[in-house]
Amino acid sequence: MAATTPLALALPLLLLSISTLVNSLSPNYYDESCPGAESRITGVVKKAMMNDRTVPAALLRMHFHDCFIRGCDGSVLLNSTSKNQAEKDGPPNISLHAFYVIDVAKKEVEAMCPGVVSCADILALAARDAVALSGGPYWQVPKGRKDGRISKAIDTRQLPAPTFNISQLQQSFSQRGLSLDDLVALSGGHTLGFAHCSSFQNRIHNFNTQTNVDPSLQESFAANLRKVCPMHNKVNAAGATLDSTTTTFDNVYYKSLLQGTSIFSSDQALLSVPRTEALVSKFASSQAEFEDAFVKSMIKMSSLAGGVEVRHNCRVVN
């Protein structure tokens, strides 16, 4: 879920194409039509994680970026064509990776039950597995999403940017039927992942007319970030992990926030109003409270649906 490319752009109008279809999704959706699908997808995610520890963060972020545009319809998986630049090539999504994990899972599931399991459901399940296999909670994913046929890079402007303040974040989430509580819980996904320098440059260089560095950052932490990400950084891969236990799903992200060692402005923004600050403190002191809230908010977010078909290949429409 960690955004690695900032877009300080105005939020768009309400997403008219998204409808919340919570009641039409079911944890038992494939029990008869493709009973082995979930375990097969979990196996693919587990194998990919063994080869690359960044896979869980990538899958979680991919699912988030999918759901926030047109609902969870697998549109982020579509390739660009000569006539259309797709979401995956929009600025905030350039750094998304691990699409191959979804491709492999889709291929294996198609071999078992052709044309049954949507790419959108595979991505939702893979995101859950990414969390559970990283030491986080396991939950029953409601299934039955359909895949979308529309994917436009320009729509990625609708994604909440790492430079957003609390009112911008609240507006972005509320447009999708998500509350301030959901915002704080889902931000905990930043316990997994890595941020490129460009996404937090605003906090460590020329912060405002009075100071170069965001005063809410712990001094030694900020100094370290400035070393890793100098003013005119030329190293594309340079950046920082989003918390100190970046491959483990835990509540360290919230503890870091309270210690002044969070990465994004949008993280720091959670301490700017009493409601969200109280939740940060609660989750920092209780892993169980965080996990419970995260699961509820993930199910809510991933129930935003908007697709129309079950793709045979996740990268192209039927």
Image (cartoon, helix red, strand yellow):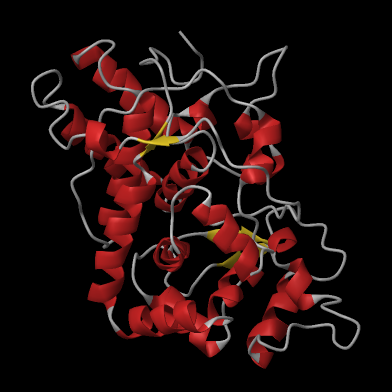
Say which quadrant the C terminus sits in. Answer: top left
Q: Residue at x 55, y 81 (%)?
A: 273
Q: Residue at x 34, y 70 (%)?
A: 250
Report x, y in % for residue 40. Answer: 20, 31
The answer to whether any part of residue 50 appears in the image is: no
The number of discs equals 0
Q: Residue at x 17, y 28 (%)?
A: 29
Q: Is residue 120 left or right of residue 84?
A: left
Compare residues 50 and 62 and report the one nearer the observer: 62
Vertical relation: 25 (above or below) 271: above
Compare residues 50 and 54 and report the one nearer the observer: 54
Report x, y in % for residue 109. Answer: 25, 21
Residue 34: name its quadrant: top left
Compare residues 116 and 236 and report the one nearer the observer: 116
Furthest toward the top, the residue is: 318
Report x, y in % for residue 151. Answer: 59, 25
Report x, y in % for residue 292. Answer: 24, 66
Q: Is residue 140 left or right of residue 178?
A: left
Vertical relation: 72 (above or below) 234: above
The answer to whether any part of residue 46 appears in the image is: yes
Residue 89: name its quadrant: top right
Q: Residue at x 8, y 21 (%)?
A: 32
Furthest toward the left, the residue is: 32
Furthest toward the right, the residue is: 209
